[in-house]
Image (cartoon, coloured by chain):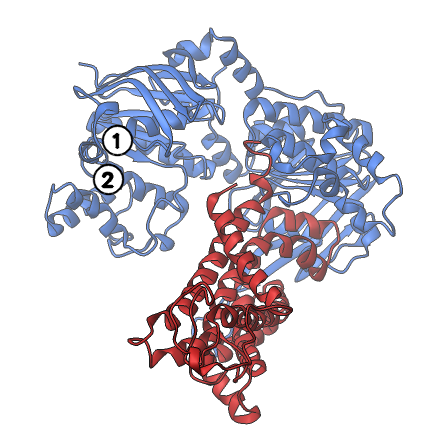
Amino acid sequence: MTLLRVTDLSVSIGTAPVLADVSLALEPGETLGLVGESGSGKSMTALALMGLLPAGARATGRAEFEGQDLLALRERELCKVRGARIGMIFQEPMTALNPMKTIGDQVAETLTTHGAATRSEALAIARKRLDRVGLPAERFGLGLYPHELSGGQRQRVCIALAIALRPALLIADEPTTALDVTTQAQILDLLQGLVAEERMALLLITHDLAVVAGRTARVAVMQTGRVVETGATDAVFRAPEANYTRALFAASAHVPHRVPSVSTDPLLELQEVRREYLLSRPAPFAPHPVLRAVDGVSFTLMRGESLGLVGESGCGKSTLTRAILGLDPVQGGSITLAGEAVSPTMPRAMRAGLQAVFQDPYGSFDPRWRVERLVAEPFHLLPARPVDWRDRVAAALVEVGLRPEDARRHIHEFSGGQRQRIAIARALITRPALIVLDEAVSALDVRVRAQVLDLLAALQESHGLSYLFVSHDLAVVRAITDRVMVMQAGRIVEAGATERVLSAPTHAYTRSLLAAAPRLPG
Amino acid sequence: MRPGLILGAVLTLAALLAAGLSLVWTPYDIGTLDIAAKLQGPSAAHWLGTDHFGRDIVSMLMAGARTSIAVAVVAVGIGITVGVPLGLIAAARAGGWLDEVIMRGNDLIFAFPSLVIAILITAVFGPSALNAILAIGIFNIPVFARVARGGALGLWTLDYIRAARVAGKGTARISAEHILPNIANLLIVQGTIQFSLGILAEAGLSYVGLGAQPPTASWGRMLAEAQTMVTLAPHVALFPGLAIVATVLGLNLLGDGLRDALDPRSRGRGA
């Protein structure tokens, strides 16, 4: 018997359609990957199944689950299904747990809410579930609070919560997007094991094709509210039928055309750089403990070179980036740009040679300013704003593939990819020698990411730029850099030509990163 | 355009108009007492009736609006001009000694209720509308400092502030160009709330005799004086009470509506 059969599910918000005739089927114990870019409707599908659509949304069609139509159920009946028969895991483990309650109470709450157990029984079951998701009693007591756990551990608590009542269906919406690659691999292994063991069906929603590869039996690809392709994962990956799926694969594997032109002229030099933070005192009048976030890092970036810096969250790469940008002082060692010392007090003219593009296309711009003012902001670094500044903004916009008229618009009128182009235009406006790209393409969909990488490669060639490319994504680093450095716990553990490091790593940490990174077959 | 914003604007405008008009004209002179016509109900001659001295209540409300609004405007002005820069400085130096000094100073002011400050000031300088302004204004400083600091703290972590720092801008310039416009929403909403609280506080201080002194008209004193006659002539207490409620409600609706209208993200949508 089919566990979940969605037939012609359509959802509209106001008059705008967000889902059109979505049909899916899931057998008990089966795993289905639901893949698509942002805005494709994959999360909206999950929300419609759970009866959690935003206010003003209307759903039509059928979603039969264990013999009842989920779309026709009233809120009270849905409450009996949610959490009990369908469990759900969300993207952001940092906000999915209540910070004021212990993890034991939160897992037990699912059981007591559905009247499945008394409080003491519920706590006993919670203990077993936490053991099962890899949080053993000796290290992870029920009395811990979410802030005492790492992101991966919190996601394990969310999973324990979702499986507390042994639901027949588990919906995981981007469960590993916010996690590091090694943690991602562990969480995906855990989900796969649980599904096999408990005969749960799994609906795994993700934007990353590689996450689904080898993890789910079948895959459905969504584009603008429609399912464009469904099939066995192997078959879809081997021979995609829909044009859209083929475009996604091409973009995922895209390598921009680059002409390496590394000079022997050093541009950025780091010598034994140390960055330390004072932590809060453990007791009144005790000395502040010191956290050494960057511990003796040295490297040289040549003019025209594209250098990658790879590492997981907490390895110190963001702290190092801030020091290189001259935003924070260093506690030891030296940073020089073209022979002059980088520091928070360096002269403006020197800052003009060093610009940055940040990760978040939404947080990188003051929402109140127009594009021309945003792009022109670094002109502040010149002695006076050039008289032809409007022309130069227009030229920069054209260079990144936008139109000169876009200068008069507000930032909220642009998509994520366009915003990242505007961020690049802003970084280019003072004609810097070095641009620091801090996870600059991580938040973008694969097709947009491919375009932005092409743009970066073309600009490097035409302007003779040097890039410091900070990222956790090995595939992107491989595509755009000449050399790469791997950072772990504040130190560079391996460095060398990108191809060499990523195909024949010598350090154990680099090897574990490569092993954990999800890969597309072929 | 939201109906709340329009209603709020109309109520606020009505209070402002009444106050403005009273500078040049009121239906009757409130300085003249007409004991023979005391405690009359609403009529064609006196739309809202007369008080225990025979003064026209419409005229008294108009003159009272002037006192209330003047006190509230200046008090909120003191709060914003002193409090907001303090909050911005504290946020820019978050965790530093300057932040600590400013915020603990704020706590100190918070620890004294405005009524106590008003009594203190009155004890030294004697009761007057000016002293009410000072007392309410001082109490507004920590409110705006905290709102500004709280809003600014969240912004300082954003990438566009980092981008501005990469563009070589100092903390003062970033605070003025990026932080202040982006917390303006918060400040406007807090401003209208403080404005309405200011009107209430002025009414309260005048009610206990620490604010505007006779013959200056004040909504609070009108309430206080009408209190003893509330069973005899309820309208004398009712109308100043309604005036306070309407103005406070109008300001709150206006603040709420302005917050939405001033957001550039909502501009152009649905247009």
Q: Position of residue A300 (x, y in %)?
A: 74, 44
Query: From what the image shows, is residue B17 above or below residue A286?
Result: above
Q: Label 2, label 1: how many angstroms apart (C-alpha)?
A: 9 Å
Residue at mark 2 shares a chain with residue at mark 1: yes
Outermost residue to the bottom: B124
**With A516 as the anchor, is A470 left or right in this view?**
right
Query: To which quarter of the image does residue B26 belong?
Result: bottom right
Q: Could you classify mark 1 by the number of other residues whose Cα lies within 10 Å: few (under 14), some (14-19), or many (20 or more)?
A: some
Question: What is the letter of the blue chain?
Answer: A
**Circle 1: residue type:** Leu
Instruction: Report the chain holding disc 2.
Output: A
Location of residue B85 (image quadrant): bottom right
In this rendering, the count of numbered labels is 2
Name the amino acid, label 2: Arg
Whether residue B102 sits left or right of residue A111 in the image: it is right
According to the picture, the residue beneath numbered tag 2 turns out to be: A132
Mark 1, chain letter? A
Judging from the image, what is the letter of the chain drawn in red? B
Near-viewer residue (B91 or A508): B91
Dot 1: element: helix
